Image (spheres, rainbow, N blue to C red):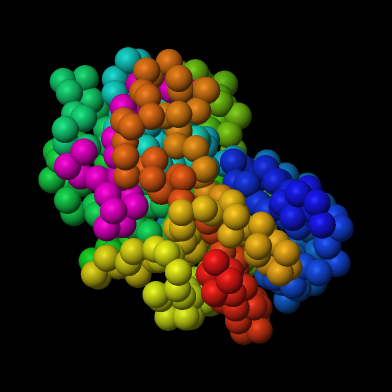
Amino acid sequence: MGEEGRLAVGVLTQGVRLRAVAPDYACRVAVPFMDLARAHVSLSTEILSDFAELIDKGAFVNGPAVTRFEEAFAADAGVARCVGIASGLDALRIALIAAGLEPGEEVIVPAMTFVATLEAVTQAGGVPVVADIHEDDLTLDPDAAAAATSGRTRFALPVHLYGQLADMTRLASVGLPLIEDACQAPGAVRDGRQAGAEGLAAAFSFYPAKNLGAMGDAGALVTDDGELADRALALREHGQRRKYEHEREGFTARLDTVQAVVLLRKLPLLERWNDERRSIAARYLEALADVGDLRLPPVPAGSDPVWHLFVIRTHDPELLAAHLAEQGVQSGRHYPRPVHLTGAYAYLGLSEGSFPVAEALARECLSLPIFPGMRDDEVDRVVSSVTTFFDGA
């Protein structure tokens, strides 16, 4: 088999490089990186019925389902208010603006995150100030955040990466208001605190591959601050609180009623789906301990992540990924280039070596399959395939 046959095919999805197996052994796919169809099988009849009702009523924009979902998700997240938004990026951007970010003010962001975190800052008129992550949880390092603070700093924007809640207690001690990027972490808990309930506001993404996924782009902003929520409601719809009364420039960033209908059906299943992810992660953690040079995901004391991703580390993740693909196991890279080393943010003037912890994670990371409905035999296949790679090394 030639080199092309051994290498997995990169599929870009929201900045995620999934490794779909090459065509010459596509028939051998035993374990997909994710299978969204499994989550929809038990819901398809109800969702189709909801769609038929929506078509009949025609309430496609700001329909009653949007309000019902907002109320249900706020209760689930343990906050007073939820504002349905068109995407996670929109939710982050609107959260920053509604919280009072002024043009030119700085926002501290982690060096390891999806690019949307920085996009939200710049699109809201702010300046992203990158800080390193901590080895203990792979989220924003509170000490690095404190060191990056200046007289122009307005907010810190911790990211609950891979479904692991950042250390909100230590980050709060830095003395900055916190806006949470909780896009990967609905239901995650740390020290008794739930993702989205600790910061001034938080943003969630319901991109289809997320723990709570819609059937298209969707997101939400949550907060206990009623005035912030009201400003967000206006910003999502052209800056108007009442029709044709535009107090400031806004966006078209509403949560579609179609997506709200889907999310209302899925939200009651989120806890069960998260528990399935936890169960799979526990099996990986036990079975892959002391295998080769693997470094398994850290889980700090008092933390209960929701495992949006299960990210292992090894000295040559591309080689391991190719081996897994040959065994019919798909894998992913999240994210193989830290945001400060991408072309989009070259203007920040940050060179390689600026943030060693994030850069090492980017070089070494490989995501294993983890999704609701994943069978025991599929988990066993992943474990066996990883183990045989190192046995033959």
The answer to whether residue 156 is seen in the rendering is yes
Q: Position of residue 140 (x, y in %)?
A: 29, 45
Residue at 42% from the left image edge and 80% from the top image edge:
286
Q: Position of residue 75 (x, y in %)?
A: 41, 63
Is residue 190 shown left or right of residue 320?
left
Q: Position of residue 133 (x, y in %)?
A: 30, 45
The answer to whether residue 35 is seen in the rendering is no
Above-or-below relation of 222 to 307: above
Is residue 180 shown left or right of residue 5?
left
Residue at 29% from the left image edge and 53% from the top image edge:
135
Decide whether residue 179 is among the magenta residues: no
Above-or-below relation of 385 to 298: below
Q: Quadrant of the C terminus?
A: bottom right
Which residue is more in the foreground, 314 or 80?
314
Which residues are drawn in magenta?
122-144
Q: Position of residue 374 (x, y in %)?
A: 64, 76
Q: Quadrant of residue 372?
A: bottom right
Above-or-below relation of 274 to 70: below
Q: Quadrant of residue 229?
A: top left
Q: Residue furthest bottom?
A: 376
Is residue 44 shown left or right of residue 100?
right
Is residue 123 shown left or right of residue 13?
left
Above-or-below relation of 80 to 128: below
Residue at 21% from the left image edge and 30% from the top image edge:
148
Q: Quadrant of residue 14?
A: top right
Residue at 17% from the left image edge and 42% from the top image edge:
143
Q: Quadrant of the N terminus?
A: bottom right
Q: How many marks?
A: 0
Which residue is more in the foreground, 370 or 321?
321
